[in-house]
């Protein structure tokens, strides 16, 4: 399979995964189908994983429970929690909350989120407007930031933790993989990333 058809295949699989994850029909079979789609996505990514990367942290394979995508290993946990608890839960797994540093990684996180809002490892808790990654590095404008229009906005002065939104239409549409700042006290799904 050519690389371009691999990318097309991955896009279709990610779209299918989002659809299945948001489906309410046959709830007993949905997790099984979702897990199989995630396995297929991992196989496609593994098959088309570049052998030479300039990024020393690039990964083409991951331990059980994680999905390789965009050169990183991700796992979405299955219970929504506040941001501090999300950090702790990822830490217990030897990981941190996901820090997408490219458009590709943002799309990976959004696809693996299963049509849910997920916490990212990005905050401006220490200094308003200065976003820091859970990996200890600042978030800069040239690293694939995908803020929704008008974001970050620190609404009511309490939004200091970042999430990847789920898609929505209407008057304030959100596109696939866009980011938003939220109050750290709301409950979203943790998206863990191996360091």
Image (spheres, helix red, strand yellow):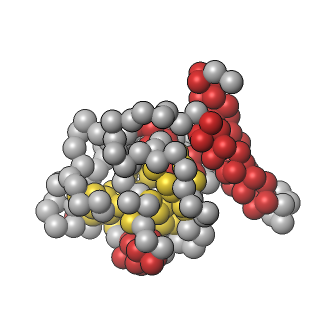
56 versus 181 height, above or below? above
Residue 182 relative to residue 19: left or right: left
Location of the C terminus (image quadrant): bottom left
Total number of numbered discs in the rendering? 0
**Left or right of 22 in this view: 76:** left
Q: In which quarter of the view is residue 10 placed? A: top right
Vertical position of residue 146 compared to residue 23: above or below: above
Question: Which one is nearer the viewer's eye here, 5 or 80?
Answer: 5
In the image, is 44 to the left or to the right of 132? Answer: right
Q: Is residue 164 visible?
A: yes
Q: Quadrant of the N terminus?
A: top right
Q: Nearer the viewer, residue 153 or 76?
A: 76
Q: Which residue is farthest left?
A: 127
- Residue 15 is drawn in which quadrant? top right
Where residue 12 sits in the image (x, y, percent)?
Answer: 67, 34
Q: Nearer the viewer, residue 77 or 175?
A: 77
Position of residue 86 relative to residue 115, above or below, is: below
Residue located 59% across and 40% down the image: 45
Q: Which residue lies at the image location 22% right of the left edge and 44% below the top edge?
A: 140
Where does the image place residue 116, in percent across and percent down from the top left?
A: 56, 57
Which percent across, then down, holds residue 115?
60, 52
In this view of the protein, can residue 166 be seen by the observer? no
Task: Name the residue rendered at 41%, 74% in the picture.
Answer: 91
Q: Residue at horizontal 36%, vertical 54%?
A: 99
The image position of residue 102, as x and y in percent, is 37, 39
């Amino acid at each position: 399979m050519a690389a371009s058809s691999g990318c097309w295949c991955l896009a279709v699989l990610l779209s299918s995964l989002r659809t299945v994850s948001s489906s309410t029909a046959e709830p007993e079979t949905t997790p099984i189908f979702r897990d199989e789609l995630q396995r297929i996505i991992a196989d496609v990514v593994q098959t088309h994983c570049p052998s030479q990367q300039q990024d020393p942290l690039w990964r083409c394979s991951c331990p059980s429970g994680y999905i390789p995508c965009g050169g990183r290993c991700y796992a979405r946990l299955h219970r929504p929690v506040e941001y501090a608890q999300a950090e702790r839960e990822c830490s217990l797994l030897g990981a941190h909350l996901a820090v997408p540093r490219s458009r590709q990684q943002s799309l990976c996180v959004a696809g693996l989120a299963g049509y849910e809002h997920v916490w990212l490892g990005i905050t401006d808790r220490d200094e308003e407007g200065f976003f820091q990654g859970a990996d200890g590095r600042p978030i800069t404008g040239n690293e694939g930031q995908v803020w929704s229009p008008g974001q970050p906005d620190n609404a009511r002065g309490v939004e200091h933790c970042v999430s990847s939104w789920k898609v929505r239409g209407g008057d304030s549409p959100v596109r696939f993989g866009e980011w938003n700042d939220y109050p750290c006290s709301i409950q979203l799904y943790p998206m863990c990333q191996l360091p």
